[in-house]
């Protein structure tokens, strides 16, 4: 995994294809693992600017 201070820094890695999901997964982001799989995750910012917690909600075979 790549350590980055925020989502904007993570978005610079174009190969990950970071996207904010819509619909019922409105607060969820995803990154591409390979041509078949992606990780869906949510981000919770702490009151301290150095702590960001990501909860992986799903590893799916999304791209068929």
Image: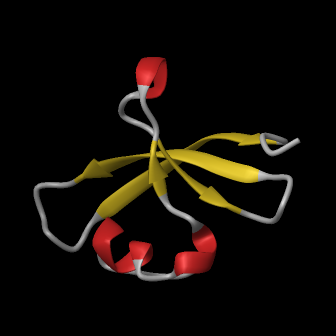
Outermost residue toward the top?
Answer: 24
The reply to whether residue 6 is in sight is: no
Measured from the top left, where is residue 16 in percent x and y? Answer: 60, 70
The reply to whether residue 9 is in sight is: yes
Residue 7 against residue 36 in the figure, above or below: below
Residue pictured at 13% horizontal, 65% vertical? 48
Measured from the top left, where is residue 23 in percent x and y? Answer: 43, 21
- Count of numbered labels shown in the rendering: 0
Q: Quadrant of the C terminus?
A: top right
Q: Considering depth in this image, is 27 or 63 the residue closer to the camera?
A: 63
Residue pictured at 39% horizontal, 80% vertical? 4
Residue pictured at 50% horizontal, 61% vertical? 18
In the image: residue 7, left or right of residue 23 = left
Q: Considering depth in this image, is 11 or 50 the residue closer to the camera?
A: 11
Q: Quadrant of residue 47?
A: bottom left
In the image: residue 31, left or right of residue 44 = right
Residue pictured at 47% horizontal, 53% vertical? 19
In the image: residue 60, left or right of residue 25 = right
């Amino acid at each position: 995994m790549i350590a980055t201070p925020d989502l904007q820094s993570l978005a610079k890695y174009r190969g990950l294809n970071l996207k904010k999901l819509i619909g019922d997964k409105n607060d969820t982001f995803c990154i591409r693992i390979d041509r078949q799989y992606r990780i869906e995750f949510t981000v919770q910012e702490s009151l301290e600017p150095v702590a960001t917690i990501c909860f992986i909600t799903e590893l799916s075979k999304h791209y068929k």
